[in-house]
Structure formats: C-alpha cells, structure tokens
Image (spheres, rainbow, N blue to C red):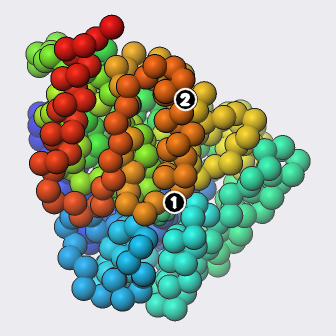
Amino acid sequence: METLKELIKYCEDVAFDLNFTKAKEWKIQDKSRVLVGFMPIYFPREIVHAANGLAVGILGGGDKKQIFKGDAYYQSYICHMPRGIVELALDKHFEEFDGFIFPSICDVIRNLSGMFRLFKLGRFIKYLDFPQNFQSHIGGTYYQHELQSILDYIYEINGVEITAERLNNSISLFNKNRELTNKIYEIRQSFPWRMTAADLYNVVRAGYVMPVEEHNIILDRIISYLNEDIGNPLDKIRVLVIGAFCEQPPLGLIRTIEMAGCYIVEDDFLLGARWIQGNVDTRTDKPLETLCNTYLSQSTFSSSVYDADNPKENRLLKQFSDRKADGIIFAAPSFCDPALLDHPILQKACNDNNIRYISFLFSENTGQFKVIKEQVGTFSDSIKLWEV
Ligand code: SF4
C-alpha cells in the first residue's frame, strides 16, 4: 500500500496534468467510451458515467500554462481562467474529447462556449442552463430536459442506452465519492494538522480527471491514514476561505494562507465536488428525475445561484459556526462578477455578527504571495492576540 505522501503526490500529478493523460488512457481502452469536458462550477457527472463516459473537469491552465494566444480572445477586464482554457484548446489539449459542457454561471463562461463552437471542438457543445425556479414541476422538469439533451448527444456518439439501473449505479458511486470527501473534511475539522489544505486540494482535484471508481479507492485509503494520530497541532486560527469557487487559486496561495498562521477548515475551491448536500436517493425507477429534484433541494449555496428563499449569507453563517471557525478569508478571482457582487452581502452579515474577515483578489497564475502572506499573517495574529 502506498504511503499517504505517495498518494497525495500521485493525486497532484494527475490533477495538474494539463494533457489529461489519465482520462485519455481510460478512454482508449474501450471504443464506446467518451470524454466530456465540463467547466466550473457544477455538473452532474453521474449522467455521463451512466452513458459509459468520463466527465472531466476543465479548470484552466493555472500557473502552469503561459498565455500567448488566449489574451487575444478576451478583453483585459475579465478573469484569467477562460484565457487559459482557450490556450489549452488552441494547443490541442482537448483533441480526444467528445463534447463540452458550459454551465450557465456567468457571461464569461457563456462566451467561452461560443468560442469552442468557433474552434469546432468535439462532437457537441452544450451551454447548460441551470434552473432558476426551484419548484419540481417547473425547474425540475426543465432541468431534466437539459440533462436529457446531453444524454442524447452522447447516445449519438456511442449508442449506449441509459437504464434506471445504470444511472442509479452511477449515482451511488458519486454519493460515495461525496461521502468520502466530506469525511476528510470532517476529520480535518477536528484534526486539521493531519493533512494540509493544499494536499486536500490535490486529492479532491484529482477526482475531476479520473474515473470515480479509482478516486473512491484513493479517498478510502487516505481516510485510513487520517484516522491515525499523525502530525502535531500548531498555534493557528481556523478560517473559511470563500469566493474561489470557479477560477482556482494557485496551490502556492493555499499554502501561503496556511503558512501565515491559518488552518483552512472549509473552502469553496472545488465546489462542484461537494455541490449536492447529502445523498441522492437511488431507490427509484426515475433516477434522472430524482437527480434533478435533488439539485433543487440539496444544492450548496453559491454566487452563481439565485436562491432567494434560502439566503446565502445565512448559510455562510451556519457554515462558520459548524466549522467552529475564527474568521473568514474572502478570496475572489480578479474581475469575477458573481463573487464580487456577493461579497458586500456576505461581509455585511459578518459585520452584523461580529465575525472577523479579510478580503483579497487573486488570479490563477498569481506568482507573488508576499503581500497576501503579510495580510493573512496580520489577520491571524490579531485574532490570536486580541481574542475576545
Ligand atoms: S471566475 Fe467568475 S467571472 Fe470568471 S468564469 Fe468563473 S464565475 Fe465567471
């Protein structure tokens, strides 16, 4: 059995392989297999799995891909991630992909779907409009049609029929995946020194680009290590990092926050992996309908979702209390409208409830962390020294 360090290193290598080698190797083993790339934040990977496919998370080039061509496709005042994705596309990193999903989270992602059409990538491009009505017979029915259209695209490619049994089996595997991922968060809630947030990030991100069956085995092994009494607690404050749900912060930034005196006990870095809260019921002969209704009733909160009946500031306060946090770090991608429009609402809730917070912006290719380290370090010290 590999050591914990070896498992994490393996995950980091797979997660940041911008050639998606793991996914492409999986595909060539069977000619009915398909690869479907999806952009942030959330996509129900279960349906692609049931259709003998692998849904692969596309999260940009981070600080590992230099942008030469991508800048020509976007104005300067938008976030960085789509430039990296365009660069990857033009450098043919997505050659073996069969289709692409663009969830409706912002104008930037919508425009990116248009560019992929121009590039003539894959066999289908789907701009996936998520329901904004949370009643099952309206939003749920609409969402089912949206997902069915993706299944129809895949059927055209590989002819695989989706049965209730197949889809329920896929849903079970992703239920398990979320359970195991959440278990690691729970262990870190009590013992955050047993695994760094950066290592956890690598492990979760690897699940975006490998078969769920393999990822579940890895998560299981990691949990068995984390159940042991490893590492020593340090004098750090406990923080939530909020706002980085789409464009991903560089690993160096996550490490910097921790080195500056914080344990990150909750984050929204790879929010799609834990989007559904709890399990999707698999005791049904209408699994697609159940999956859609679960989205309506069990989604986490996010800047990309207008959910007036369940205000996100209340949900943030609950998360803060559940995680027994000392403060919140609002870290948003530069020029990210959804994140930045939410921050005043969330920060007002913090002010009203005497919750300490700081805020800064980043880009996926930010390379200098000195200023952030000083800001976070001062935040951490001020809480440790003047705790009331
Ligand atoms: S980082 Fe923000 S603005 Fe950019 S694609 Fe994501 S949600 Fe849209």
**Residue at the spot of label 1:** 337
Secondary element at image label 1:
helix
Please state which of residues 26 and 251 is positioned toward the viewer in this rendering.
251
Does mark 2's beta carbon lie closer than 8 Å to ligand 1? no
The residue depicted at 40 percent of the width and 67 percent of the height is: 79
| Quarter of the view holding residue 4 | top left
Residue 246 visible here: yes
Residue 50 at x, y percent in the picture: 58, 55
Q: Quadrant of the N terminus?
A: top left
Rendered location of residue 198, percent (x, y): 22, 41
Which residue position holds label 2? Answer: 349
Q: Is mark 1 within 8 Å of ligand 1?
A: yes
Q: Nearer the viewer, residue 173 or 103?
A: 103
Q: Residue at x 84, y 43 (%)?
A: 135
Q: How many numbered discs?
A: 2
Q: Is residue 337 left or right of residue 281?
A: left
Q: Earlier in the sequence, mark 2 or mark 1?
A: 1
Q: In the image, what residue occupies the spot 80% across and 58% down? A: 142
**Is 250 on the left or on the right of 139, as rendered?**
left
Pointer 2 local density, CA inside 10 Å: few below 14, some 14–19, many at least 20 = some
Task: Give the amino acid at mark 2.
Answer: Ala
Residue 167: x and y, percent? 64, 49
Q: Quadrant of residue 348?
A: top right
**Residue placed at 50% from the left, 77% from the top?**
112
